[in-house]
Image (cartoon, rainbow, N blue to C red):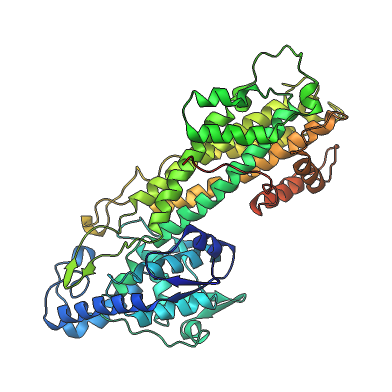
């Protein structure tokens, strides 16, 4: 991937968005996009000159759509729109999310159907390229008509009235643009609306959630395999023949990933003659559940890749026509975030159940709560309580936001998506699942330590060594929060998943 992303309106990829989450990015506008953008601007100018009534160009907004605005007031209309809609509250979105929002917004405008001058987009890209990050409150959007409030805070920075952060400092008003050598933009007809009307906040949240879901799915496979070993579980549930007859590709691929990790070990050989007929579902059904998670994730990624190159503005300009529609409605993104939230919650649920198995002597060779001195020590008893608390939180957070709607703008905007909240709570679930998995990894590691001199598979030994290093390999009671945090950090940095591969889709 090139160091500079060239925006055509049609070629942005999820990998580019992922780069925004990781750190600063640079982007440029291609010449053909500039030409298309100018053509749509020319149409807007003709609308104003001819005094032809078009929503958002020479009318009010929302419930004021029937209020005509004179050609002399169109600049003031756009300025007022940006100022009045900057009503966000709550914690600010993290820099990586804001970078993604800026890149998505720029690429959408580059398609040239929004009636905004290339010059405005160049100013937006100047901020992105110098990593001057607008400060955007997270709350205030219902996901239709687009993400108006948060995008208004972005637009404020373009007109010299916003706030941004750069190199650890807060910049305000014209100092934001001064930092990138630009002057405040005087927004022309339609331009304020083009900047505000869109689903880029909802999209960025969903994209970050999808990226984290893939990390957590891979981590869940590793944690599950490690728990199978510590619990002296059977490898039989991962046999390819079982999954072939279920006829679900994603399930078969997950089972294959488990087989690549569970290739035989002295732990496994030690219980070939045991009397346990079947393992608990949290061990035995991982391919089925994780296969469903993978199917959900791949559906989400397919939708989100298309969203990278979508236009969610309104109205839109096609040659000489200005058409009002509803592309600003973020239902597709709200659904995706809610689907991911459900899938992630199941990752956490299964992990918490395996932790319970590790602590309550499903494997009789392990002490209750994995203590070295039962009774004198509590072992990992309370670590499981933490996992249970987080799993329970997730069950509430997984309730779909997209089934809710609340009318706004005096009933004009009578059905909304709630996609931003769907995305934000999905990320909350991600954070909980990270910690639930960290606790399972800690427990499985201690369980395998208790089984020594029996050893796990060659494929899992590096993972086990890393976990034991991060948790200081202590078998005595201690404040386990430090170990959990260290493992959580390793999960999110992807330090633990370098040796896990989920094969791609079948041709």
Q: Nearer the viewer, residue 94 or 333?
A: 333
State left or right for residue 184 relative to residue 343.
left
Q: Nearer the viewer, residue 459 or 99?
A: 459
Residue appearing at x 79%, y 30% in the figure: 370
Q: Is residue 254 above or below residue 283?
A: below
Q: Is residue 92 visible?
A: no
**Residue under the image location 45 percent in, 51 percent down:** 423
Give above or below for 433 relative to 267.
below
Q: Is residue 11 in view from this perspective?
A: yes
- Taking the spot 81% from the left edge, 27% from the top edge, the residue there is 266
- In the picture, measured across the screen, residue 156 lies left or right of residue 373, that is left
- Residue at image x 35%, y 49%? 332
Q: How many marks?
A: 0
Q: Position of residue 436 (x, y in %)?
A: 64, 40
Q: Is residue 482 left or right of residue 5?
A: right
Q: Quadrant of the N terminus?
A: bottom right
Question: Farthest residue toward the top?
Answer: 275
Q: Is residue 113 above or below residue 489?
A: below
Single out the residue that lies furthest toward the front. 507
Left or right: 259, with 21 as reference point: right
Which sits in the foreground, 274 or 357? 274
How far across and how far down the image is residue 309, in percent? 38, 61
* The image quarter in which residue 378 lies: top right
The quarter of the picture where residue 375 lies is top right
x, y (%) of residue 147? 37, 61
Residue 484 point in image, percent of width and height: 72, 45
């Amino acid at each position: 991937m090139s160091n500079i992303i060239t925006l055509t309106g049609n070629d942005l990829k999820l990998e580019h968005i992922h780069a925004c989450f990781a750190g600063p990015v640079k982007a440029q506008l291609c010449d053909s996009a500039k030409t298309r953008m100018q053509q749509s601007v020319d149409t807007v100018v003709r609308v104003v000159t001819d005094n032809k009534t078009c929503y958002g160009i020479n009318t009010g907004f929302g419930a004021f759509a029937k209020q005509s605005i004179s050609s002399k007031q169109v600049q003031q209309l756009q300025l007022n729109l940006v100022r009045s809609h900057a009503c966000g509250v709550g914690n600010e979105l993290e820099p990586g999310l804001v970078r993604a929002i800026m890149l998505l917004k720029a690429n959408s405008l580059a398609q040239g159907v929004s009636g905004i001058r290339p010059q405005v987009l160049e100013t937006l890209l100047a901020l992105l390229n110098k990593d001057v990050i607008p400060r955007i409150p997270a709350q205030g959007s219902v996901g239709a008509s687009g993400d108006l409030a948060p995008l208004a805070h972005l637009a404020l920075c373009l007109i010299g009235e916003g706030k941004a952060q750069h190199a650890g400092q807060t910049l305000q008003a014209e100092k934001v643009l001064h930092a990138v050598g630009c002057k405040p933009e005087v927004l022309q007809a339609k331009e304020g609306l083009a900047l505000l009307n869109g689903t880029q906040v909802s999209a960025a949240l969903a994209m970050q959630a999808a990226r984290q879901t893939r990390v957590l799915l891979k981590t869940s496979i590793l944690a599950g395999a490690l728990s199978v070993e510590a619990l002296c579980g059977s490898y039989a549930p991962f046999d390819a023949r079982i999954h072939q007859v279920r006829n679900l590709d994603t399930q078969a691929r997950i089972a294959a990933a488990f087989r690549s990790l569970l290739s035989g070990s002295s732990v496994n050989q030690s219980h070939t003659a045991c009397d346990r007929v079947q393992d608990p579902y949290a061990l035995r059904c991982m391919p089925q559940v994780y296969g469903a998670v993978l199917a959900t994730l791949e559906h989400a990624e397919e939708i989100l890749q298309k969203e990278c190159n979508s236009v969610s503005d309104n109205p839109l300009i096609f040659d000489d026509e200005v058409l009002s529609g509803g592309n600003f409605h973020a239902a597709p993104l709200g659904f995706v975030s809610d689907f991911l939230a459900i899938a992630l919650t199941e990752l956490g649920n299964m992990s918490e159940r395996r932790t319970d198995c590790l602590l309550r002597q499903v494997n009789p060779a392990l002490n209750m709560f994995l203590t070295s001195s039962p009774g004198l020590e509590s072992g990992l008893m309370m670590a499981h309580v933490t996992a249970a608390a987080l799993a329970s939180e997730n069950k509430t957070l997984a309730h779909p936001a997209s089934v809710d709607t609340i009318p706004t703008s005096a009933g004009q905007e009578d059905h909304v998506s709630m996609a931003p909240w769907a995305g934000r709570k999905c990320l909350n679930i991600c954070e909980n699942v990270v910690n639930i998995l960290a606790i399972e990894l800690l427990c499985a590691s201690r369980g395998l330590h208790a089984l020594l001199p029996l050893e796990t598979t060659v494929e899992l030994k590096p993972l086990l060594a890393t976990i034991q290093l991060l948790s200081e390999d202590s078998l005595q009671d201690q404040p386990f929060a430090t170990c959990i945090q260290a493992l959580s950090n390793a999960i999110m940095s992807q330090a633990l998943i370098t040796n896990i591969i989920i094969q791609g889709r079948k041709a």
